[in-house]
């Protein structure tokens, strides 16, 4: 499920190396689109951890992300569920991507096409 949120960067955390094969970086965006501002934490993983580097705290951005969920069973057998907002693209302010933040080949469907139906 791919979604997006506009807001201001509140906090940028340092990159965390979890294992040889996995690294992540978290950041928080303040979404003020409703009556009560929301502090939303996103996660960048692997080669995308540097996407947030070029943005400053307080800067307005649009974050494109996937909603991820998983189940975990503790050693005692207790089952827990976790959600992650995994960011995959970040755009400055009004939505114009900065050169380094856009994936090399992003294909977006046009609202108007030449299909006859």
Image: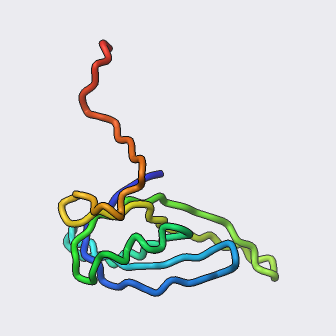
Q: Is residue 68 left or right of residue 26?
A: right
Q: How is the image coloured?
A: rainbow
User: Which residue corresponds to the image point at 26% horizontal and 68% vertical from the top-left?
Assistant: 61
Q: Is residue 88 above or below residue 27?
A: above
Residue 88 spot, x, y in % from top left: 44, 61
Image quadrant of residue 51? bottom left
Camera-nearest residue between 67 and 109:
109
Q: Is residue 83 visible?
A: no
User: Which residue corresponds to the image point at 36% horizontal and 57% vertical from the top-left?
Assistant: 102
Q: Is residue 70 visible?
A: yes
Residue 103 spot, x, y in % from top left: 41, 55
Residue 19 spot, x, y in % from top left: 69, 79
User: Which residue corresponds to the image point at 58% horizontal and 71% vertical from the top-left?
Assistant: 82
User: Which residue corresponds to the image point at 37% horizontal and 74% vertical from the top-left?
Assistant: 52
Residue 13 spot, x, y in % from top left: 43, 86
Query: The C terminus lies in which quarter of the figure?
Result: top left
**Count of labels in the image:** 0
Q: Is residue 26 above or below residue 116?
A: below
Q: Residue furthest right?
A: 76
């Amino acid at each position: 499920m791919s979604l997006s949120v506009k807001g201001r960067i509140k906090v940028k955390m340092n990159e965390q190396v979890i294992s040889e094969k996995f690294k992540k970086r978290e950041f928080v965006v303040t979404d003020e689109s409703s009556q009560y501002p929301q502090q939303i934490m996103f996660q960048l993983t692997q080669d995308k951890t540097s996407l947030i580097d070029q943005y400053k705290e307080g800067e307005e951005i649009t974050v494109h992300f996937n909603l991820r969920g998983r189940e975990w069973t503790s050693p005692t057998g207790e089952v827990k569920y976790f959600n992650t907002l995994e960011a995959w693209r970040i755009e400055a302010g009004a939505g114009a991507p900065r050169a380094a933040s856009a994936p090399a080949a992003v294909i977006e469907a046009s609202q108007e096409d030449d299909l006859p139906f």
